[in-house]
Amino acid sequence: SAVISQKPSRDICQRGTSLTIQCQVDSQVTMMFWYRQQPGQSLTLIATANQGSEATYESGFVIDKFPISRPNLTFSTLTVSNMSPEDSSIYLCSVYKKLARNEQFFGPGTRLTVL
Amino acid sequence: AQSVTQPDIHITVSEGASLELRCNYSYGATPYLFWYVQSPGQGLQLLLKYFSGDTLVQGIKGFEAEFKRSQSSFNLRKPSVHWSDAAEYFCAVGSGGGADGLTFGKGTHLIIQP
């Protein structure tokens, strides 16, 4: 399994500002992902965080809005830039470990409210 | 493109009754299928998964799911629900067994009546 922590767990931010969310895993993982869960909605994949290279973004998500870093095999950050109320969501980090028998583990999420 | 449909937004079941949550998927190859549960204020927890072999898979908390290729379905079942099962349930599909990002359904909100 994997123990995943996210910081902050929640935040309230002003329009136009940026917030960086951290994801820390207790062991080295092969893949790290970032998802968004808008209020009352399902999870949508934002991007795959690649270690040592640029993240791979899904359609509808761009690097300027959601810059991602992954400096090593246990840590990643997602920044939500120039926020608007539409960015109010839960942001979740997930990880995949090769030896974990086809399972993706999710962090507890960061609840973001933009005023 | 892959997609997941959960036709039921809300389901209400009496405690002790049986449960079936529906999931239909669209995927070009053999899919990796997952059911996750999200309790209020909690993260996502994997209930069970399917990627090959026996089409009836057993999961945690007494849940099971059956993969039916002909119907493109992966319905979740439980013979007797408990009040603690009240939560949001998500069906998801992916390739690479979780090594790629997952596509989630919109979720089914399960309400347990006493």
Image (tube, grey):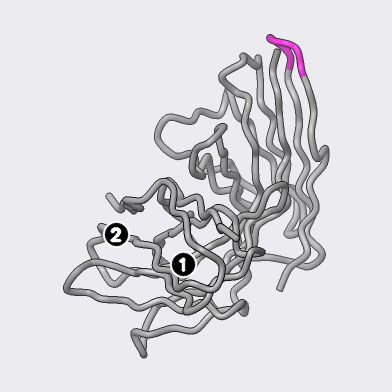
Residue found farthest to the bottom: B54
Among all residues in the image, which is located at the extreme front? B114
Task: Answer left or right for B71 relative to A113.
Answer: left
Residue drawn at 57 percent across, 38 percent down: A36
At 48% from the left and 56% from the top, the residue drawn is: B90
Image height check: is A48 above or below A114?
below
Chain letter of the residue beneath label 1 in the structure image: B
At 60% from the left and 64% from the top, the residue drawn is B85
- Asked if marks 2 and 1 fall on the same chain, the answer is yes
Report the number of numbered marks. 2
Whether residue B77 appears in magenta in the rendering, the answer is no
Residue at (73, 59) in percent of width and height: A73
Q: Amino acid at mark 1?
A: Phe
* Predominant SS along the magenta part: loop
Closer to the camera in the image, B30 or A110: A110
Checking the image for residue B34, the label placed there is 1
Residue A21 location in percent, x, y? Answer: 75, 36
The picture places residue A71, in percent across and down from the top left corner, at 75, 48
Amino acid tagged 2: Tyr
Numbered badge on residue B25: 2
Question: Magenta residues, as a range?
Answer: A13-17
Find numbered disc 2 in the image and state the secondary structure of the residue it sits on.
Answer: strand
Q: Residues within 10 Å of mark 1 (few under 14, many from 20)?
A: many
Give residue B9's position: percent from left, percent from top.
41, 46
Earlier sequence position, callout 2 versus callout 1:
2
